[in-house]
Amino acid sequence: MIMRKQIGVLDAGCRDVLAYSPVAAFGYRDTRGVARTTFVGGTPGFARTHSLKRFSFPVPGPAVARGPVSLFFLLPGVGEVLRVNGAASALRSGETAVDVAEAYVHCAQAVIRSGLWEPPAQFQAAEPVLGDGPLAGAGVSDFLAASPFLAISTWDTGGGSDTSPRGERHAVARILDGHTLVLADRKGNKRADSLHNLLQDDRLSLAALVPGRSGVLHVRGRAAITDDPALLKTMALRGVPPHLALLISVEHAEVNSNDALADAHLWTPEGRTGHGRAPDMMALGSAHLAANPAGSGHGSARLIKLITAVPGMSRLMRKAVDRAYLSGLRKEGYDNVQVPVAAHHGDAPEGDAAESPLRPVRICEIRQETPTARTLVLEDASAEAKPFDFDPGQFFTLVTDIEGSAVRRAYSASSVPGATRLEVTVKHVEGGRFSTHAHRGLRPGDRLAVRGPSGSFHAPTQARDQLVLIAAGSGITPMMSMIRTRLSVPAADGRIDLLYSSRSPEDMIFGDELTRLATDYPERLTVTRVLTGRDGRLGPEGIRRWVSGLPLSDSAQHFVCGPEPLMDTVHDVLQRLGVPPERTHRERFTGAITAPAGAAAPQEVRVEQDGSLIGAAVVEPGQTLLDAALAAGLPMPYSCTVGNCGECMVRVRGGEVTRPEHTCLTPEQKAEGQVLTCVSCPLSTVTLDITDLSASPLLPSTRKPPVHEPCCSTRD
């Protein structure tokens, strides 16, 4: 029966798993023939199904060689995994495509043993490693001492590959010396694929993880199967040793931050419940068995279909299998094991799901506004279209994969709030990573994710206020949302006056639409254009004349968005004209802030609130404080995650962190020990205080800037 559960295509149940799963373990060989295992994904549906036999996904790191590959897909809160084996080939988009050879449901014992979905344990240092070698490297022994779960990849000589889960109640693998690991082989799904493969090819790779951390330990080497009684006895549980073990001669071991685990937030409430109902893995396994009459016989297949069609039968099967899991594990010597609490998500009401911070979207249309600016029209990637709610002028953070790395950039919405489609306009910046990808790589149908909205640069909710808008270049994008929104309300009061500077008529984003709107609404909208190629740059005198010539109301709100020199000039002019500071708002467009490199070894971050410790996390080398804390399920404040909105500002109570230049923190905030966790890395053990800073009378809150000068929306 174990071997009869596999099928050769992605049926509807498999496709449901791929749509739900945010992370998969992936085993492959790179173009140099090096064996590698890692975790890929980051958001539900990261693996795109192209047909019953093919799906694709982005892979970070070294390129995948054509040939045998294997995966297993994790479902948050669920014990069983879906294993898929096949062959890899490259797609034009840069993704790796997998042609499916077999797919099947793997039992939950590895997940149950490891307690993978249980609350993360506290960080503890390991014993020193004997001798030199890869396992004596920075952070490796500490990581292994805390890791209860790993993925192991092996290959045979006939073009096959296998990646399977391994789990233990405590450390899943034990270091014998700087070059040697031992991994117990306990009872599992009885396929023994890894053992069969190692008898033909002793090369392997593995990727270990620690619940609550977004780092991954990557190991590769060669393995031998042993039944040495003396060694097995050292791994016994309540006097029950494993039947076999793998002795791994390690050639490489290194801990790296993993974007897939960081973005998936597997151990947060939204990470575990934010994807709707989990697929019923019992029903899926039964369907695969019933669909395989060649192995089970036509009569058996019909019987299985009849049994599983009985109402409530899947629930009863779930309970029976859970009991069998627990009984078998207790016989192996495991105490206090329990099935994952979310294994029954299939019975949960739809309303129980929490909101995920990342919203999967797809590009339904691309409009070329100018030779260097295009608008991406986005809608929900799921079948259910929900509105995009925001205040006109706010921005969203777009998340996509470029060459195997997750890239985030913030762009102002240019559409009207409340619609089921969101429009963001991207101007190409020479050398800009995201903007180049948006102009040369993205196509309708491609998928992204969005976070937000963010930012306090937005029009007032009172429709009676006059709007005075001054924009240059792509600074028109948030203004366009304000204009479209105000004009979409027939009875709205308050006129709009726009001063718009661009290099030439061809470079004027939304130029034709602005002309049409000014013609259709002459009493509500005026548009004054300045062409710098013809008229020269917009200077103080030109701005003063234009503002002074407007019929300004006492409640007029002034918004300016564009290059820093222009905004400084406008600010000075408005100040001289007596415009109150609270009626002046400015938005800067700059490049995204890159977090400076932190410590070379993992560091602990402790998070306090109102003087009480609420949790701790481990920050991997190169990882930000925010990513590590969120991966551990800590309630950190944040919004854009790219250093632009200031929502993640916290106080450093102890330790040293990197502090990137040119953030939106004021000198006073920096002097008081404030940092932006989304662009800061630890240099030592760090203690953070996340008490709401807006209550402090000494510090202007970045979350609600009193001078209406929020952090910048990126344009690269």
Image (cartoon, rainbow, N blue to C red):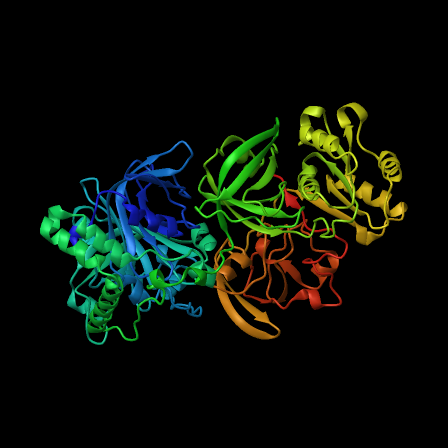
Where residue 265 appears, as percent x and y from the top left, is 46, 58
* Residue 478 image point, x, y percent: 67, 42
Q: From the image, which quarter does the N terminus lie in?
A: bottom left
Q: How many marks?
A: 0
Q: Is residue 686 left or right of residue 492?
A: left
> Measured from the top left, where is residue 507 in percent x and y?
68, 27
The image shows residue 664, relative to residue 314, as above or below, that is above
Q: Is residue 9 above or below residue 232?
A: above
Q: In terms of image quadrants, where is residue 649?
A: bottom right
Visible residue check, residue 153: yes
Q: Residue at x 51, y 43 (%)?
A: 379
Q: Nearer the viewer, residue 616 or 45?
A: 45
Identify the residue at the far front of this view: 491
Judge by depth and name the residue closer to the eye, 131 or 491: 491
Front residue of this view, candidates 629 and 112: 112
- The image quadrant where one finds the C terminus is top right
The image position of residue 401, as x and y in percent, is 47, 42
Q: Residue at x 20, y 63 (%)?
A: 187
Residue 129 appears in the rendering = no
Residue at 27 percent across and 45 percent down: it is 11
> Relative to residue 255, is residue 666 drawn left or right?
right
Q: Nearer the viewer, residue 210 or 222?
A: 210
